[in-house]
Image (tube, helix red, strand yellow):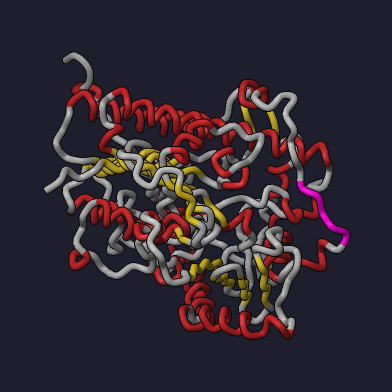
Amino acid sequence: MARLPNLLLIMADQLVPFLTGAYDHPVVATPNLNWLVEHGVRFDAAYTPYPLCAPARAAFMTGRYASDLGCYDNAAVLHADEPTIAHYLTNAGYDTALSGKMHFIGPDQLHGFRHRLTTDVYPANIDWVPATDELGRFPAGGHARLYVAPNVGVRPWTKFLSYDEETHFRALEYIRERGRTTPTQPFFLVASYHHPHDPFQVTQELWDLYEGKEIAVPSFPAHLVETYSAMDRWVNEVHETDKVALDDPDNLYQLRRSYYGLVSYIDRNVGELVAALAQTGQLDNTIIVFTSDHGDMLAEKRMVQKRSFYEWSARIPLIVRFPDDRAAQRKVPEPVSLLDLVPTILDWAQVRVEHRLPTDGASANALIEGAAQPERTIFSEYHVEKVRAPCFMVRKGRYKYIYIHGHGNQLFDLEADPGEWNNLAGQSEMQQAEQELHELIMSRFDPDRIAADGAASVRKRMVIRQALHENNTHWDYFPYFDATKQYVR
């Protein structure tokens, strides 16, 4: 039996593929991601299954849709009896390790990993339950304020940079110790960084990387508000986009320049991980995957954060590099999902199909090999947090269809209209395509069940949250290092 490959999965947070050199941006410097593309496979239509951190990551870990897991928001518990990729790979003989963020909510903070090398950057408790007031209003989150001055720009340091530095050091230490001790067991290491997630605050050195560079900023049509869906209006209201100058050119410049710097920071970390593999003789037996949980609107359409199905929020980078440079420089145009990583990686680890439970993702290995495939259908969903109805997206071929249950729909031709400005829904010549895509969503999801289940979940968690506070109970992970057994003793 051939030696199983090591697996290094690098995950950024809120990283827009369009703002990387690896995806052909002319200014943003990502030489290490460029190297992965030069020696690997780039997916040009990869999507998040849920444009929100915790549900997207729960879906990624299990290969299942977040609504089937009951993971609707950033305070939804991923249950301990859900098999994850870490469980499967542990059973397949891998040493499984997580360094950095995975936004697990609940008392199980390992979910199959043998080692967790850091705590999480965000709370593991259900503190962030998306409750509404007596009038059914969500509390204003004010996220838009993090996208404009004075909350954007240069800082001496931030706690989020500290978190990513710890994440990075522990991941490097793991790789180097593996090289020093040369165990026979293959590894699965996830190095998961907070950046370039907001707040967009950079060191002077990262800011200076883009001194004198052209920083493109979004422009807005006069009829912008008329293009908004119900989902857009709901999240804009809670993000308070109308309370800040998101269309001010100086604000937009500072936002984009800071974001560029944080993308280059992540790229630098990618390069150091690859260099550590090479230095320790492990690069020639390690498959490297780079991705993100979702994107960020970054003031496109005068919107912020994620919680949207537009390309800037829903599209993610996905790059795979094999030790033998297999399929190097291949660009995969077919749509894929973060859900597809579980079956794809389990194929690489030679986990037999009969030893797996069903997942919603499909292996992308045939696409990597360039084999002809039937037209793929990719779904994304978003519910409960800051929206008043279940929301869905389906991508098939050139078309993307968005359905807000009971509140209208959108249809975009991404080939003719990559900026998603021209809503084709309701046009007679598009009736057949619209109907087909709508039926695809309705045949896979039950919006009424999701709405009822999401509301019931919030009510239950409100009770539990209060008791956790009364008892001062916390689920945050505490990494343990026994210093008495380190170094020379």
Q: Is residue 348 left or right of residue 48?
A: left
Based on the displayed image, in which of its 4 quarters is residue 425 positioned?
bottom right
Q: Which residues are magenta?
A: 218-222
Vertically, is 262 above or below 147? above
Q: Is residue 383 visible?
A: no
The answer to whether residue 219 is magenta is yes
Nearer to me, 362 or 484: 362
Main SS of the magenta part reads loop
Q: Is residue 242 left or right of residue 368?
A: right
Based on the displayed image, in which of its 4 quarters is residue 221 positioned?
bottom right
Exactly how many numbered labels are in the figure?
0
* Residue 299 screen position, x and y as percent: 72, 49
Nearer to me, 458 or 247: 247
Looking at the image, the residue that sits furthest to the top is 488
Q: Is residue 302 left or right of residue 288?
A: right
Q: Residue at x 64, y 60 (%)?
A: 310
* Residue 34 screen position, x and y as percent: 51, 36
Q: Residue at x 18, y 53 (%)?
A: 91
Q: Is residue 70 visible?
A: yes
Looking at the image, the residue that sits furthest to the right is 222
Vertically, is 33 above or below 334? above
Q: Residue at x 33, y 67 (%)?
A: 359
The answer to whether residue 20 is magenta is no
* Residue 10 screen position, x and y as percent: 41, 41
Q: Residue at x 39, y 39 (%)?
A: 191
